[in-house]
Amino acid sequence: MPTLPIKQALLSVSDKTGLVYFARRLNAAGVALLSTGGTRKALEDAGLPVRDVADYTGYPEMMDGRVKTLHPLVHGGLLCRRDNPTDVASAKQHGIEMIDLVVVNLYPFEQTIAAGDPPIAEAIEQIDIGGPSMVRSAAKNHAFVAVATDPDQYEAIAEQIETQGGTTAELRRLLAADAFANTARYDTTIAGYFARKTAAEGASEDEPFADRIELSLVRESALRYGENPHQAAALYALAGAPTAALVHGEQLHGKELSYNNWLDLDAAWAAAKALPSPGVAVLKHNNPCGAATAATVGEATELAWAGDPVSAFGSILGFNVEVDEAAALCLAEPGKFVEAIAAPGFTDEAMEVLTTKPKWRNNVRLVKLDTEAAPAGRIVLRAIDGGYLAQTADDGPDEPDTWRCVTEAQPTAEQAADLRFAWAACRHVKSNAIVLARGGMLVGVGAGQMSRVDSVEIAIRKAGDRVRGSVLASDAFFPFEDSIVTAHEAGVAALIQPGGSKRDDEVIEACNRFGIPMVFTGKRHFRH
């Protein structure tokens, strides 16, 4: 497949980035321009000579533009094999002109569904038919036709035409590969959208999942390495992911985000959003080591860091409100080090502090995230060897009105507030999870232990003297009274847990014996 000249190009694009500049270069190289609708108008407005596809085919655009390029004169010009005498004779017989370059990008279906939950009729109108058909025809016949599906490809194509008089076989093959990948992604996004819609309409508690889940992932960036330096890594965005998703966060400052940074930011953002506002979560190795809510974000930051200052060194922070100057000054104090911060925003004063004062100012990653709430209970996937596990996300709100105190002693108003806070934080700690809280802040965390009593002991040790008068939250039930005895001896004042053990009566009896109030939530929050 040699370098082939480009004599005629068909342009029909939704994203008009770089279109006029590219078309000018094609025109200057003697390429005839054929176009449709809005693309044709943009070229005409720029003073470029362009022929309307409707004039070429003899058929006007119809049905609100749904039908305009689905015609033999178009697809014959794309699919004709120039070295096949029968194809060439058929083209001549039927007046089919050769089209050597197709410039097409598709209706913004992905952007439409990512921006929210539009009416299905609106989403359907963003399903391109003619565009993918032309792209596939051109890509199939890439031995003779070049196809551009992304404005980033315009420069390479124009440069080859200007310097070599046409496109090389190697470039056409690369463009064809990209074209098929783009149409595959497009179709997968549409299929995934309809699968979610039909699953939602026909979903039940027993069967909320579709028979098939189509995934379309686009590489956003290559990462320096994975969890460890010997592992390669990259970041991919899921087609149609909402604008509020972490993957679409805007990095305002700092070094490139690493694989571990992305994981911790995801956990920090989720934990912060679960807290009362203003709330701050301090994450280390995917677990909260501190979290707090207070009257101001500055106070909440101080309390969150104070939860475990040793572990907080080199941490990732999540804020559920804008980071202000007071919060930034707290973090910039000597002896503190922050890897990254995720927040809905940063005041100008906070940006000034964080990017000029601490020693780590040049490296700290500051990520601004959209606060739009994603629908609760979405399907989340987790890879295993050869497949995926799917489940509904544990991101729905808790319902304190359904909780019940199962002990003779009742929590005070202050204890009840701390129990709600502890429960919100506990669901973001790896199982077996135990957290201790007092005064709207975490004072001790026990995470990821093989036995629940070990987690209790670690949380108590982390809390130190602050354990006295604190409340304890457990992500799952206590199977024995041993953890209750340990908590009481340390000075824990109240407990919250799901309940549901066959030994609940023994655990309740132990609390009654010690005069400790205990609340059952009826909902477990394992996090593996």
Image (cartoon, rainbow, N blue to C red):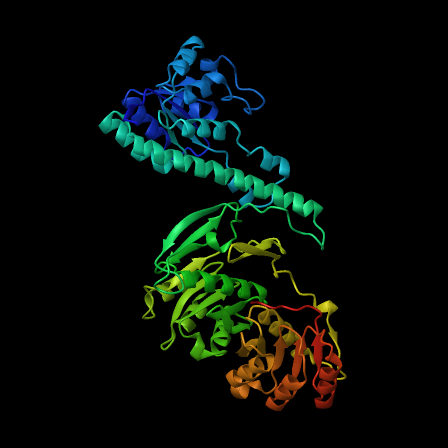
User: Residue 390 location, x and y as percent?
Assistant: 59, 55
Q: Number of callouts in the render?
A: 0
Give the percent coordinates (x, y) of residue 366: 41, 61
Q: Is residue 205 left or right of residue 6?
A: right
Q: Considering only vertical position in the picture, is 412 above or below 324?
A: below
Name the residue located 59 percent from the left edge and 72 percent from the top edge. Answer: 426
Residue 366, can we see it? yes
**Residue visible at 37% across and 28% down in the picture:** 142
Up-down relation of residue 360 to residue 411 (above or below): above
- Rendered residue at 34%/33% (across/down): 154
Q: Is residue 379 left or right of residue 135?
A: right
Up-down: is 340 above or below 488? above
Q: Which quarter of the figure is the C terminus placed in? A: bottom right
Quadrant in the picture for residue 328? bottom left
Q: Is residue 348 visible?
A: no
Q: Nearer the viewer, residue 499 or 254?
A: 499
Q: Position of residue 162 (x, y in %)?
A: 25, 27
| Residue closest to the far left | 163
Image coordinates for residue 397, horizontal then vertical, percent: 65, 62
Q: Quadrant of the N terminus?
A: top left
Question: Residue 42: which quarter of the image?
Answer: top left
Q: Quadrant location of residue 327? A: bottom left
